[in-house]
Amino acid sequence: MWKFILRRFLVMIPQLFLLSIIVFMMAKAMPGDALSGQEINPRANPAELERIREDLGLNDPWYQQYIRWASNAVQGDFGISYTHKTPVMDVIEDRLWNTVFLALVTLIFTYMLAIPLGILSGRYNDTWVDKTVTGYSYIGFGTPIFIFALIMLFVFGFALDWFPSGGSVDSKVDEGTFAYVVSKINHLILPALSTALIATTSTIQYLRNEIIDNKIKDFVRTARSKGVPESNVYSRHILRNSFLPIAAFLGYEITGLIGGAVIIETIFSYPGLGQLFLSSVSLRDFSVVTAIVMMTGFATLLGTLLSDIILSAVDPRIRIE
Amino acid sequence: ACSNDTEKSSTKEKKGKDVEQVDTSLFPTKTTNQGEPIDGGHLTYGLVSDTPFEGILNKVFYQGDPDNQVITFFDEDLLDTDENYVFTNDGAASYEISDDNKTVTLTIKDNVNWQDGKPVTGADLEYAYLVLGSKDYKGVRYDEQMALIEGMEEYHAGKADSISGIKVDGKKITFTFKKANPSVTTGLWTYPLHKEYLSDVPIAKLESSDKIRKNPIGYGPFKVKKIVQGEAVEFEAFEGYHRGAPKLDSVTLKVVNPSVAVKSLENGDIDVASISADQFDQAKALDNVEILGKVDLAYTYIGFKFGHYDEKKAENVMDNPKFEDKRLRQAMAYAINNEEVGEKMYKGLRFPANSVITPNFKYNNKDVKPYEYDPEKAKKLLDEAGYVDTNKDGLREDPDGKEFKINFASMSGGDIAEPLTNYYIQQWQEVGLDVQMLDGRLHEFNSFYDLLKKDNEEVDIYQAAWGVASDPDPSGLWSRSAAFNYTRWVNDKNDELLAKGISEEAFDDQYRIDTYNEWQELIHEEVPIIPTLFRYTTTGVNKRVSGYDYLAERQYKWFNVGVTEEAK
Amino acid sequence: MTLLKVDNLKVHFPIRGGFFRRVVDHVKAVDGVSFELQQGETYGLVGESGSGKSTTGKAVVKLNNVTSGQILFEGRDLAALSRKEIKPFRKDIQMIFQDPYSSLNPKKRVLDIIAEPLRNFERLSPAEEKKIVQDFLDKVGLSPESIHKYPHEFSGGQRQRIGIARSLTLKPKLIIADEPVSALDVSVQAQVLNFLQDLQQEFNLTYLFVGHDLGVIRHMCDRMGVMYRGRLVEEGNSDEIYDNPQHIYTKRLIAAIPDLEPEVREEKVQLRKKLSAEYESSYSTFFDENGRAYDLKPISSTHRVALQ
Amino acid sequence: MKKAILQIENLTTSFRIQSKYHAAVDDVSFTVNENEIVAVVGESGCGKSALALSIMQLHNKQRTKSEGTIHYKGQNLLTLNDTQMNKVRGKELGMIFQEPLTALNPLMTIGKQIEENLDYHTELSRDEKKNRTIELLTQVGIPYPERTYKQYPHELSGGMRQRAMISIAIACNPALVIADEPTTALDVTIQAQILDLLKDIQSKTKMGIILITHDLSVVAEVADRIVVMYAGQVVETGSVKEIFNNPLHPYTRSLLNSIPSAINEKNRLHVIEGIVPSIAKMDRKGCRFQDRIPWIPKQAHEESPHLHEVGQDHFVRCTCYKEFYFQAEGDASTHDITQSR
Amino acid sequence: MKVESGKIIQTKDVSPSGMKIIWQEIKKDKLAMGSLIILVAILVFVYGASFFMDAKEIAKVDFLSIYMEPSSDYWLGTDYGGRDVFGQLIIGTRNSFTISLFITLFTAIIGLSLGLLAGYFGGATDNVIMRVIDFVIALPQLMFIVVVVTIVPVFNVYVFILIMTMFLWTGKARLIRSKALSERELDYIHASQTLGTPHWKIILFQLLPNVSSLIIVNFILNLAGNIGLESSLTFLGFGLPESTPSLGTLISYARNPDVLENKWWIWVPASLMILVLMLSINFVGQALKRAADARQRRG
Ligand SMILES: Nc1ncnc2c1ncn2[C@@H]1O[C@H](COP(=O)(O)OP(=O)(O)OP(=O)(O)O)[C@@H](O)[C@H]1O
Ligand SMILES: Nc1ncnc2c1ncn2[C@@H]1O[C@H](COP(=O)(O)OP(=O)(O)OP(=O)(O)O)[C@@H](O)[C@H]1O
Ligand SMILES: [Mg+2]
Ligand SMILES: [Mg+2]
């Protein structure tokens, strides 16, 4: 098991290396740089801008910049953000946690919805319950998330005013207090719920199909032949097997949420990684852009690893030595 | 993330003169609420931005405008400006200019103290210069005017440890310039750094230090109490403020997304927030909010590409003959209807520009009229210039009978950008000019300026905007050597007038006004660019707020602002 | 005449593991098997599941890579030939597969299925091709109209016959039949077995018949080899092996065959019990310390047994 | 007279296919006695599994309909509701399935799957259950029961899995075990072991066994009585000796003749023409086997074939057996083993 | 020598050929049938109408008619540029569908080729292809797309299709690979190998037809999924230029709260169009899926 994990980490190294080169080259290929924004400021002195560029090494060929960057990056130093004037890791840290919390809460909501609905729909397939749930999941499938989120924001954030309409925490509460935690959660609910209500639909469908597939399996018949009551046939046999692929997707799901937070964070002005990424792209804050992409890439790799570990933990047939 | 200096402006002086297009009465600039501010009042300021603020809370270092909006609550410049944006002696310091116009002396008032109780001294301002000129300084605020201070260039080059042209004596500080420049009365850097507080941090580390980012100390009306990084700031009144205790007890600043700013105003979640054109109609309809407006220090224009920038000689070279004929340029100016663009697209928040100096400046030449929409005249000019449709495809060929295609580059951003661009193209096509959008799409900000800066040959004409500084001198954008002169237009007369505008004689205001009037006439006649639109900026203020003045610098004079009732 | 001579054939499959997915071990699926096939005879390979029967068969048609050993077909060593060089031999050696359902491409019509080998080796006009295919269909007892049908339109036995027709088109000399009837119902099984016998006579075919049903093997084969864990433990004429098994494994195998006579069943149960005990006690006389069967030793001119 | 455990009378089980019901088990009656193995034989698709599942009431209720009676200990199983049936299943009736790999839950240890049976039918404590499970594993001949208790199905060989399956079926000492092709997926050696094991267990517990198979030699090995099914119907039934020595129905005779065995060695095997009709397409009038013996004149068949008693406890459907003969075919004529004895 | 009469006996699951099964399955499923009718109607109308429409005319900015409510002149009102929303909806639907079609097509081609190669040959080929897939999957897609969009100088429908294809082929490749992997263990492939058929022929003529039903089903379901694809990018400001109207463009006008709240005619029809298209394609796809899988067939 540990060997397996270690090996996977070793395999990640070349992947990350390749990723970093691609990311770096792409970042450099974007027109303009962090100082371009100053070029429409008539008071800025072009010669001075050139001097700063030279100082920051922005005029060097990309591979020199890359080597410089990479040698620092392996030591955990992703450089200084030009727009934020502070080490990239500091900039990312707060945002990262916000995004991770958002992803986690979204995940919880997603499963809270998907599991009961998927079970109902799979167990009583082709009944009106199933049809309702399936109908919902089809509509979710066809609804662009941002429209839905905007509507949620306007209904619950403004019209009903149940939830805050932006930010990650109320500025009046103090860190470390209970009120702070409550406020954080309060800010998470609306974006998380909006994502979950849409994102859950695929999980529901998946679970439903799994259950329908599993309930005609031979071992279920065996269980029935033992006289296991129907409810236990479900809880002990069908559901456990149906959850397998979903559990295995957990890792991917988390990273998917982190990588895909861009839209929801933009709509809910939620200061997370996605939003930071977008603004860093438009401000050409390369150090931040590369760091975020590298981190999400790494997270994805971790997610796949996590998925594999979870799968091997829940499925005895897949054993990781 | 640009033009920090565009905010300073004034419109008053236009009153007496011809203001037929510029109706400043379109919007009030002050809150109408005359009520007595309540004690312990609290105000929520909406910082309208689609990204969090970066949190570099110092004018020397900050980069994006959101940070600047935060700074103005707790810090300020030493010199105030009048409606003509010229320095006055009403602020935290007074100033004097020597007879030879080369020396400026600032005297900081006695009651001006940092929020930790320490007095603000000349050494603090000197320290700001020492930081700005230092080679460890990575910001962009070291400008040409600073370089005019004696000894500054030496210091900047690392050849000197101090700046010989700056002398400090307690609360007094003197700047000596190598040559007299009228811009000194408008453009001098007067923002001090708390030397005692900050000097133990190396200059290279200042911008990332907690002293700037988390616990900034200013001498403005409010103290920073708490910062939620990027999202919100809690301020409390600074009782020792030099103009007297502020009328509010506390202020919350929080970032609101542009798309929900109006909604938040309506809800009363925030009291003050700027309003963009696309939400103007919605904001106007709110009855708990009044809308203040002013003319912005910026203009939009359509530029023609005349050549390229020669980096080695640091000079613009006019070597592209495509738009040589000024009748062609004039025709293109006549062909577009900016009146309608301002009215319809921008809901009256923009109006045709007559010049490249904004109308809230006294230097704006009111006698110059915008090119009015006149397609017939445009066609006539084109016919005269030889651009006629020889192959009857509905589009004009150039005088040699060859196809004449014009690539139009335009920048993305905001909903209106694309239809506006299309609209211009349509109108040019109506007079027979084959104008196409470059690459078929709008270009994102960075890409766009990359195209301009590198004089991409594909670009024939482009639409852009300049925010203008409080200093009226247009050399930075128009001179033969200016790298920002993206049209690469050079003209001897232009060079001569620009030099006159910052000569010693220009300390005489009327001389300067006359010079710039003449310059504007030149630009109008030559049309190296077509100035298209001036703009209003508007802000929504809850009706419970009193004492808020949206004009110019006073937009940020928060000490005077109060609320007359509790928030709902 | 010896048609096929398999000499000390080994097929090992790598097991990967460890840090860099290196090969840490091998499954010795076939581990030193030697036998000969005479022209026109049917040679059977029996043994329990996983004993390496199919692997041996597949090695002969080059579906598996041979680790070591020789496969001499008419004197040429197939094991040493590359995939390209083997092509001419493809005509001579054909295979019939176990599963009549998966061995026919469900998306192809019968014509295309049977003509596939023809198209690879001969340039024929569509009419000639059709004629040949219909001839063979006739031979295997299917109507000529069948060429336009799809495999799913046939029953299991009919499908198996289509597979056989396909393998016959090139007029092969040797046919490897890997459990050709074990997926079929008894009634259908009979049909296919009869048929294989008929064809053998008509075309003078040689069969390498792989199977685990000893009844079927005995019915079909002249000679047979018993495989156990990748090795042959006994080889000889079918009758010799059935009537006079020498190796303990063979004995157990034969005792396990259910009999159609209910009267003798008690005896058989007892026999099995006895053999099982014998197996435990005499293990070391039949297997070395690694559990590997010894090399074959002749005990008569035709009968060889793996003994110490 | 032996004690009857299960009495099936006129059982008809129909499946709904495109809104119509078609019988897969058609008017089947037979009895299973204590300490007796009744073998149900027939080709694939004859309705053997459908019969087994009807007894266990494991069909999907929405799509199947069962009529007739299945008497077990004085109650008609067909009238029981799910809860009542759950008390019977596992406890009184055990079932062994064909594919031991798919019939075992891949995520549960063998031990847990056996214990589950005890969970619902006994009051044993945790430890007692474990002990009983290990005892069962030992009983079915698993060499390391303690270890196997903790193993998952995929870690066992096919034979071991089938043994585990058997221990599930016999965990509560059921009166009747239904084994649906328990050895088809196994090697001959393992098959023999499993069959011996079943007999062995039976000799101790006196349970009745319904053994479903298509392999007549397996039947000859273990069964006491035979029920030959064709197209959902019982076509012949009788004791093993009777059927093997005096098979009458053309179907039974054909089956016996198609098996390669020591007796008909090297002879041509008999081939039954055609296939079992599918339940939806079947012609339910007349003798269902007549299409497969076309050389027998139509008149030989009954119009609505009944089971005729032809010997002690020996029943044959239809009268066609009287006229039946094997068709001589070409050169090598079929050697009819059924007549040779 | 005849062993048995030539009579062909039909097996129990008599199944007619591909198209027939599909058609029967769709006929049996009212939802799928309805969906198919709606889908065909929409597509015929949209492609037909857009043929007669002047795209230039629709993209023409007209200040006299900004934000007009639906009327007989403008069936679905106008947007802030005074452009006819109905016209944009027609052209937008056409564009969005075409884009989706091509993205699906290209990803299918790439996924199919690589998946078949990896699955058929296994071993080192499989390993290399799988590593590439692993790598592409590990890329944070949305972020990469955003960066790529800012890099490319010319951004139009073709480039957009290309960029999306770059990231979306992996799922298909994996799907095909696993199917091919299991398929190649089947004896008909072995048979072809022993019959001397070259690899490329086996892949093209034996393997491909057998993964085709999977591909078709996946193709249809992806086609549905990809219709909404461009809308979220447009929302983020990285979508197609407005001069190529798409459903995403129309929907993302709702970013402006004024439009969202008060100008439903701009974004609601486009949203509904996406919903209807996605659902109807999806329903047809589900029916195909059942047709492809005998176990699930309703017939
Ligand atoms: N491609 C392969 N990779 C690894 N191991 C293999 C491979 N093919 C076969 N084996 C192993 O080789 C051994 C022999 O397999 P083979 O298929 O020849 O057995 P068999 O005697 O034909 O059994 P069966 O009666 O089940 O068909 C088995 O242990 C099997 O697991
Ligand atoms: N759930 C079902 N729905 C519809 N038809 C069914 C169902 N189960 C079985 N059948 C049909 O009923 C008939 C009898 O099937 P059954 O499974 O009982 O056969 P069997 O004798 O057990 O065959 P095998 O030896 O293949 O297991 C077959 O024609 C089959 O197609
Ligand atoms: Mg095999
Ligand atoms: Mg069955």
Image (cartoon, coloured by chain):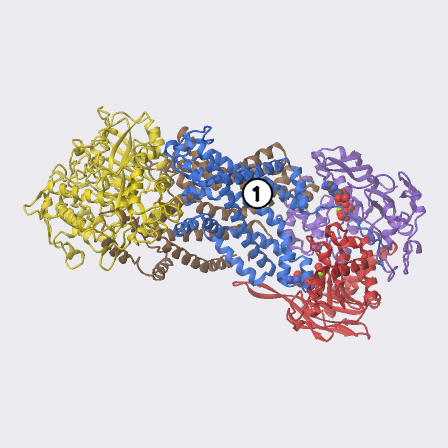
Q: Quadrant of the C terminus of chain C?
A: bottom right
- Where is A95 relative to D68, above or below? below
* Relative horizontal placement of residue D84, taking residue A193 as reference (left or right): right
Look at mark 1 in the image and give the residue it sits on: A206
- Where is B323 relative to B39, above or below? below
Ligand 2 lies in quarter:
top right
Q: Colour of chain D?
A: purple
Q: Tell me what residue is drawn at x 63 percent, y 33 percent.
A: A127
| C282 or B48: nearer the viewer | B48
* Place of residue C120 in the rendered image (x, y in percent of width and height, measured from the top left): 68, 64
Q: Bin the neighbour count of mark 1 within 10 Å (Cα to Cα): few under 14, some 14-19, many 20 and up.
A: some
Circle 1 chain: A
Element marked by disc 1: helix
Is residue B143 something one can see in this rendering?
A: yes
The chain letter of the blue chain reads: E
- Where is C75 relative to B167, above or below? below
The chain letter of the yellow chain reads: B
